Every structure is written in C-alpha cells, then in structure tokens.
Amino acid sequence: MAQTKGRFEVHDLGNFTLHVYYTNDALGDASYIIEGKDALVTMEQPLFKENVAEFDAYLAKIDKPVDKRVTDYHVGGTGSHEVVMPEGMHEFTRGEVYAGMMNGFAQAFGDAMTEMPTGRASEVAFGTVQTWAGVAFEFRHGAATDFPGASILIGGKAYYTHWTPAKAHVSHLQISSAAAIDAEIAEAESSLATGAELFIGGHGGAAGRDAVEFKIAYLKKMKDVLGSANTAQDFVTAMKEAFPRVGWRSRLGRLGQGVI
C-alpha cells in the first residue's frame, strides 16, 4: 500500500458531510470537501503537487460532480477549473503583498508546488448567502486581519475562518496590534453566536466550540497582559505562565522580538 502524505477526516453534519483534508504540508494547510446529496463543493484546495494528487483522487472516489470550487484565501491546485472568491480577493491575489508571498513560497519549495490556477474567478459579495450542492454558504466579513478573505458559515453547522481556533498560542499574524486583538475577539464571539458546532480554517483543520471559547479567553488575557508588560519579552513570559500547557502552534516567540 502506497504511503500517503496527508489524511482525511469525515464529519456528518446532517444535511451534508464535511471532509477535512489535513495536508501535513510545510504551511499547515487544510482543504475541504462539502458533500451534499447530489454534488460537491471544494474549499482551499492544496498547494503542493503530492497533496493535489491525493486530494483529487479522493474527490474522484466520492463520484459526485463538483458544483463550486471556493478559494477564500489560499490559491491552490484548482488548475483550469473556475473558482469562486469573496469580493476583492481576486484583485488582492494579483497584488504586491500576495504575489510576494507566493514568490517566497516558490523560492522556498520550488518544483514541489503545483502550477498556479488558470481558471476564471468570480466573486461573491459579503453579506450574501449562496446555495451550492444543496448547502447554504453565508459569506461574512470576518476579522480585519483576514480581509479580504471571508468567514463562511456552511449549512448553519460549520464556520470557516482563515485560521482554525485551537487550544494553542495564536499566530502572531492575528495579533499584530491591540486593534487586531479586539477584531479577533469580536469575530470569535460572532462565530459562536451563529450556533455552529464545528469550526474550520485554511490552517489547522477542525475544532469544536471549546476551542473558540479558549481563543476568546486567551485573547482577553492577552489584552490584560499588554497593559502591564514593560517589554515584548515580558509579555511573552507572562503568556507562557498564564497558559503553560498549550502548544506553540505558531511563532509567538517572535513577539519577544517586538513584533506586537
């Protein structure tokens, strides 16, 4: 039996099934298949060739037509297929910031990356609900740190953001300022208010409501610590002491170098 790169996890959410693909790639990406009764929707397809092959093979085995392919933030291996993006994302992916990021990945990973997509991209307005594969997709504005990526409520059951909430120290990319922390708290509280039971993201995979509640408590503690810390290193030390058992999923240590 051939060795696989990533792994799939399946969640039955009543009127649809959510397939989570953990790529195990260098970027910690996750991809998704939303399976309705008669069709499929993909989200955040993989970036690396071996993951693209694995994802496409799994997709073929489900043996249902793909209604839509959603690129919320991660431009991946959708090939020549048409994709759907939140409003403003298509232009953003062609701009200096996103292009610079992708060029950096190309230099770091070379031929391991798949070819960039060539299919036509259409956009979905924030505040609208689209129904694909018999499942409702509500495009919400989300946190400012993710814009122009959307938060997407799927079938009223799964809530997608760029980063999956986790019982871990959050990414420094989400907490670059006090205003960013406030935005993340507001978004996390808003996600809980939807009644969703599963929380997913382009990085991290799937988690329950307890992970969102942890994130809120963590960020509120962070605000308290910021008010009393004299240096960035004081802040990092205090957060380690407050949450000694959580993993270092991201590079919070960079905060000790004055990132926040």
Image (tube, helix red, strand yellow):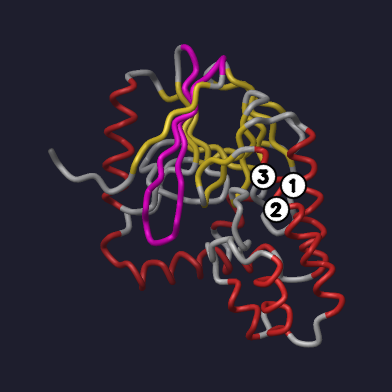
Label annotation for residue 150? 3
**Rendered location of residue 127, percent (x, y):** 77, 35
Residue closest to the eye, 75 or 166: 166
Viewer-nearest of discs 2 and 3: 2
Which residue lies under the disc numbered 2? 215
Q: Left or right: where does residue 67 sit relative to residue 130?
A: left
| Amino acid type indicated by mark 1 | Ala
Task: Give the quarter of the image for residue 45.
Answer: top left
| Quadrant of the drawing holding the N terminus | top left
Label annotation for residue 201? none
In primary-sequence order, the first of circles 2 and 1 is: 1
Q: Which residues are magenta?
A: 14-37
| Amino acid type indicated by mark 3 | Ala
User: Eyeballing the image, is 178 above or below 168?
Assistant: below
In primary-sequence order, the first of circles 3 and 1 is: 3
- C-alpha separation, residue under disc 2 versus residue under disc 1: 8 Å
Q: Left or right: where does residue 58 sit relative to residue 222?
A: left
- C-alpha separation, residue under disc 3 versus residue under disc 1: 13 Å
In the rendered structure, are the residues bearing label 2 and label 1 in contact, judged by CB atoms less than 8 Å apart? yes
Element under disc 1: helix
Which residue lies under the disc numbered 1? 188
Element under disc 3: loop
Q: Identify the residue at image location x=45%, y=56%.
A: 28
In primary-sequence order, the first of circles 2 and 3 is: 3
- C-alpha separation, residue under disc 2 versus residue under disc 3: 19 Å
Q: Left or right: where does residue 175 sit relative to residue 23?
A: right
| Amino acid type indicated by mark 2 | Lys
Specify few, some or many for label 2: CA neighbours under 10 Å numbering under 14, 14-19, or 20 or more: many
Element under disc 2: helix
Specify few, some or many for label 1: CA neighbours under 10 Å numbering under 14, 14-19, or 20 or more: many
